[in-house]
């Protein structure tokens, strides 16, 4: 007997039935835990989604402005730079009491935060540093707007 015959099927049905029964018992409890977790961290979820959306949109705007080369408008770049800076300062102002700034400057926290709070701090600081870097990129685009730069293409003779 190779073990692949019809004799294995009752065991397979029993295993599937056993797994289905286990899921039936665990699923309501798991969903309840998930709802409680989301409820406790609702603001963090919304802020995370907001910051990620702004980051993706900012990146898209910056790519389009970079592609315009000599046709960029300084007023547009100034506006984008101001919006980026206001967003970064706004997030840090909103969470000014949640110890976001201490880890940003590599200062140890006064007390060790809970796991999910630490993940939130890391995520927010990482994204805000990237947003601040985009502000610097916008300033560089304004500075180099009218310069031709160097042409590194070889001319074929």
Image (cartoon, rainbow, N blue to C red):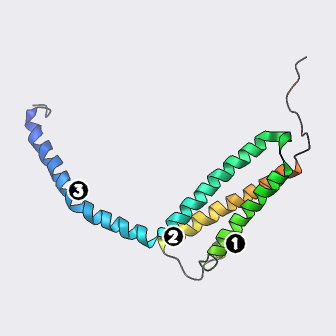
Residue at 79 percent across and 53 percent down: it is 138
* Among numbered discs 3 and 2, the one appearing first in the sequence: 3
Residue 23, label in figure: 3
Residue at 59 percent across and 83 percent down: it is 110
The 10 Å Cα crowd at callout 1, few under 14, some 14 to 19, many 20 or more, is: few
Closer to us: mark 3 or mark 1? 3
The 10 Å Cα crowd at callout 2, few under 14, some 14 to 19, many 20 or more, is: few
Residue 33, label in figure: none
16 to 99, vertically: above or below: above
Q: Which residue is at the front of the view, 129 or 89?
A: 89
Task: Tell me the element at label 1.
Answer: loop
Q: Quadrant of residue 130?
A: bottom right
The 10 Å Cα crowd at callout 3, few under 14, some 14 to 19, many 20 or more, is: few
| Residue 2 percent across, percent down from the top left | 13, 31
Q: Which residue is tagged 2?
A: 43
Task: Tell me the element at label 2.
Answer: helix
Residue 105, label in figure: 1
């Amino acid at each position: 007997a190779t073990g692949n015959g019809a004799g294995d099927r009752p065991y397979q049905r029993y295993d599937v039935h056993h797994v289905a029964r286990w899921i039936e018992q665990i699923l309501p409890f798991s969903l309840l835990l998930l709802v409680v977790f989301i409820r406790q961290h609702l603001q963090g979820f919304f802020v995370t989604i907001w910051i990620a959306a702004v980051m993706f949109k900012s990146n898209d705007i910056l790519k389009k402005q970079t592609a315009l080369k000599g046709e960029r408008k300084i007023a547009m770049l100034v506006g984008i730079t101001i919006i980026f800076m206001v967003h970064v300062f706004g997030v840090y102002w909103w969470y000014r009491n949640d110890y976001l700034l201490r880890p940003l400057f590599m200062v140890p926290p006064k007390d060790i935060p809970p796991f999910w709070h630490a993940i939130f701090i890391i995520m927010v600081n990482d994204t805000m540093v990237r947003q601040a870097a985009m502000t610097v990129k916008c300033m560089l685009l304004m500075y180099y707007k009218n310069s031709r730069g160097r042409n590194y293409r070889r001319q074929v003779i």
